[in-house]
Image (spheres, coloured by chain):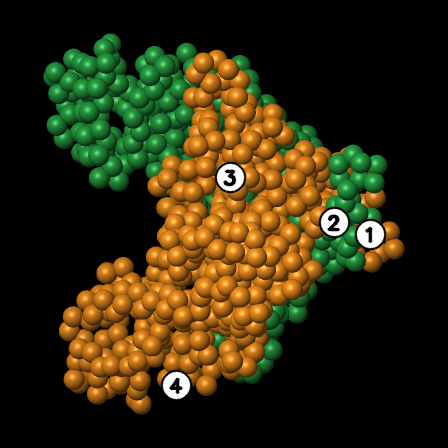
Chain colours: A orange, B green
Amino acid sequence: MAKEVTQRSENYSQWYNDLVVKADLAEQSPVRGCMVIKPYGYAIWEKMQRALDDMFKETGAVNAYFPLFIPKSFFSREAEHVAGFAKECAVVTHHRLMNDPGGKGVVVDPEARLEEELIVRPTSETIIWSTYKNWIKSWRDLPIMCNQWANVVRWEMRTRLFLRTAEFLWQEGHTAHATAQEAIEEAQRMVQVYARFAREYMALPVIVGHKSPNERFAGALDTLTIEGMMQDGKALQAGTSHFLGQNFAKSFDVQYTDKEGQMQYVWATSWGVSTRLMGALVMAHGDDNGLVLPPKLAPIQVVMVPIFKSDEERARILDKMDEQKKALEAEGHSVKIDDRDNLRPGFKFAEWELKGVPVRLAMGPRDLDSGTVEVHRRDTLEKRTVALDGLDKSIASLLDDIQSNIYKKAFDFRAANVEKCDDWAEFQEKIGTGKFLLCHWDGTPETEQAIKDATKATIRCIPVDSFVCEEEGRDIFSGKPSSRRVVFAISY
Amino acid sequence: MAKEVTQRSENYSQWYNDLVVKADLAEQSPVRGCMVIKPYGYAIWEKMQRALDDMFKETGAVNAYFPLFIPKSFFSREAEHVAGFAKECAVVTHHRLMNDPGGKGVVVDPEARLEEELIVRPTSETIIWSTYKNWIKSWRDLPIMCNQWANVVRWEMRTRLFLRTAEFLWQEGHTAHATAQEAIEEAQRMVQVYARFAREYMALPVIVGHKSPNERFAGALDTLTIEGMMQDGKALQAGTSHFLGQNFAKSFDVQYTDKEGQMQYVWATSWGVSTRLMGALVMAHGDDNGLVLPPKLAPIQVVMVPIFKSDEERARILDKMDEQKKALEAEGHSVKIDDRDNLRPGFKFAEWELKGVPVRLAMGPRDLDSGTVEVHRRDTLEKRTVALDGLDKSIASLLDDIQSNIYKKAFDFRAANVEKCDDWAEFQEKIGTGKFLLCHWDGTPETEQAIKDATKATIRCIPVDSFVCEEEGRDIFSGKPSSRRVVFAISY
């Protein structure tokens, strides 16, 4: 066997960490709360980036880059935003080190204190809106739709690889519009882009909905979210899109002259997903053997393992594999031949299972004679013997099938674990067992808080476009009238 | 006319800044020394990234991501590296803000002081080698070739957009090898990748050579560089590749077991290019009308400007343009139709010249009747009338021609401004007039320093593979014997 992985049933949290570390996705760094994203993990992130970036550009967004640092005073400009963000962050106070007069390495030069402290961006609304002020004069300058791929820092006391780290990578889109309606549509468009990405690339079904006021982004009038169900039944918020109203425009005095010559404040949105998606990918599909990667995001889609006894067999098999690799690559698949000579096939099988490679081909001398290959699919762990003739076509169709099957499995799992609940005792009993509960809510923050205090469950979202939720009823806790159900769950 | 640009002959430095700002590449931010890279500038950077990233991956490098922060103590580990880098940098000392007890916004929470200060990475050798220690056990783990695309911060007192900024974007490759020879070859391979990128994409001829010991990277045994000539005859260092020997391996105790079972220290390289390349691109090719972008890096390769009097003419011309745009896009060109209705054609012409778009097509009613279009090329400012029939082919060939011509122009300009010099009086006279002087040097840091003190000129590099430089002679300053010429110039 390759590296041992903790079983899900034994310790889900340790299982997650094992997969991330042992499949070489990421590891803790010597810097508290900051991770190293290893090449195999980063290759998945690059595929996510490429797909998302293309989708953003299709909507008309362009990329730009804004400073890492934000002057401290900017955080005092948007009152609600401060309250939400200005707390735990990395503060730069000095700009020089010097040799320790005592001779022990380097120390901070006390003379080099900054006049105003700089904050390492936890998010960039403030610096971007202070910039947009110079870019926007007339209605002709609108809309502006900029995205940036960047690192951000939020000091976190308890961190978990990908799910919650002090530094993480993300994209943040920031758009400026002439009207509220346009901004609201943009926020809706982008949350749907995220939902489509989750579905089509991550093979992850998500619920799209509004956050309750308690859970909104600091400074937003509305926060839209995509919520996925992990295999322990907990919810993971995988992306958000905010309608910011005119809050930032007013704080940074961003006005434009409309067609009638009147000055108007600009309307804003922001939207982002982060390396947290990597955590969602691991937790949604992995099994006790390791990662299960959807083919569209797998850095290696097909791995080939030669099985041989003699050098002569090895050479013949590798020749044939090379030929097949070229044919598969010509079809756009990424293929690796594992020709390491110091490891047994069984060890290699386990290692590539751990790494979640969708398809494994094993070929021995008898396969060579019969013109066949053993095909193993990671999602179902099924094996079958396939003809080498036309392999490119059968692999293409198999990869499609794996992509759909992983989605279907996640979809069915969620379907089996979402239920309506109208009884408070039942709610308390079920909420900790890995269910999404669709319940009536009276719309007040007080009730939401009381439910959270009693059960740790939060309103993950108020779903958009869900006829299942649209019905009259009474709040699960307060008994007050409600016009639609919302999604309650324990979350990451 | 569109925005006015300072003429090169009048004030070269202001001309540069005008191009960067008025062509919408970048602007100063409210944070001292940090720039905002605007969408048009960032689109060029993205094209550079994509081309470089593909070239890196062809050599076997993979991408990864390491933390933004480096513990202060790491800077005391590699003695020479400290001396070179640990001085001007951003130091994080606290991790929390709090509401000002006096009620005026936010202040740094004095309780939230970090036990050890964190430095925002000025470069990542130390954090990466502390990580490689865990990745490398045996010769089978080598080589490791990781690259990261990241932001870095070096506190600078005097900044210039793209050329020298406190925060900049770059890539840094860090490789680990079993032998010195392999590491030396890697450093050489990567500087040649940079040279090829400069030549083929940026249309910029560069001199590849070794830095003199004075100008080496802190901690390197050898630094290879590519040096380009700007239009004022000054040199710009556009990329470097370092052979680091075993310095970092020894500082971070990175050893591997070789095939004979012996412990050996690992050999290292690092190599990087940054957004400084954007500055080189502007300064190498721009003219008094604005940017001149090589087609391979131009976000928009072809812009179409309709010329009309009536709405009916406008509609007919835009229809035809749409058709041509689709045909050109099918050939892989990026095309924009400038259909803004509030600007005259002359204004649009000037604006797209300022932005350096390689080809402009103008079409009026008469063109429509005769099945022609006016084609204007940015590099030579020449216009001619071309048949619409087969336009996709003629544009493809024109873009190739422009790419070659921009390179040739830069190449000829450099050729006319590089000369051998063997007389100290002549050197002093010529070095400030925009020349690269090929001179004999006795190989001592003292002579190099004396020449710098007298003239501000530095040794840009000791060229590799240049038969022109390989000859016996006497040092231009000291008169001592020398076995080859080196390149002296005033630099950015």
Q: Quadrant of residue A70?
A: top right
In the picture of the structure, the residue carrying the numbered disc 2 is B96
Q: N-terminal of the two: label 1 or label 2?
A: 2
Residue neighbourhood size for the residue with mark 2, other residues' Cα within 10 Å, grouped as few (<14), some (14–19), many (≥20): many
| Name of the residue lying farthest toward the right | A102
| Disc 3 + disc 4, Cβ < 8 Å | no
The chain under label 1 reads B
Task: Classify mark 1: helix, strand or loop.
Answer: loop
| Name of the residue lying farthest toward the bottom | A309
Residue A454's tag is none
| Disc 1 + disc 2, Cβ < 8 Å | yes
State the CA–CA distance, disc 3 to disc 4. Answer: 53 Å
Between B325 and B342, the residue placed more toward the observer is B342
In the picture of the structure, the residue carrying the numbered disc 3 is A243
Residue drawn at point x = 58 percent, y = 38 percent:
A125
| Disc 1 + disc 3, Cβ < 8 Å | no
Disc 4 marks a residue whose amino acid type is Gly
Q: Quadrant of residue A319?
A: bottom left
In the picture of the structure, the residue carrying the numbered disc 4 is A346
Q: Are marks 1 and 3 on the same chain?
A: no
In the picture of the structure, the residue carrying the numbered disc 1 is B111
Residue drawn at point x = 15 percent, y = 25 percent:
B388
Q: Mark 1 against mark 4, which lies toward the viewer?
A: 1
Disc 2 marks a residue whose amino acid type is Arg
Disc 3 marks a residue whose amino acid type is Phe
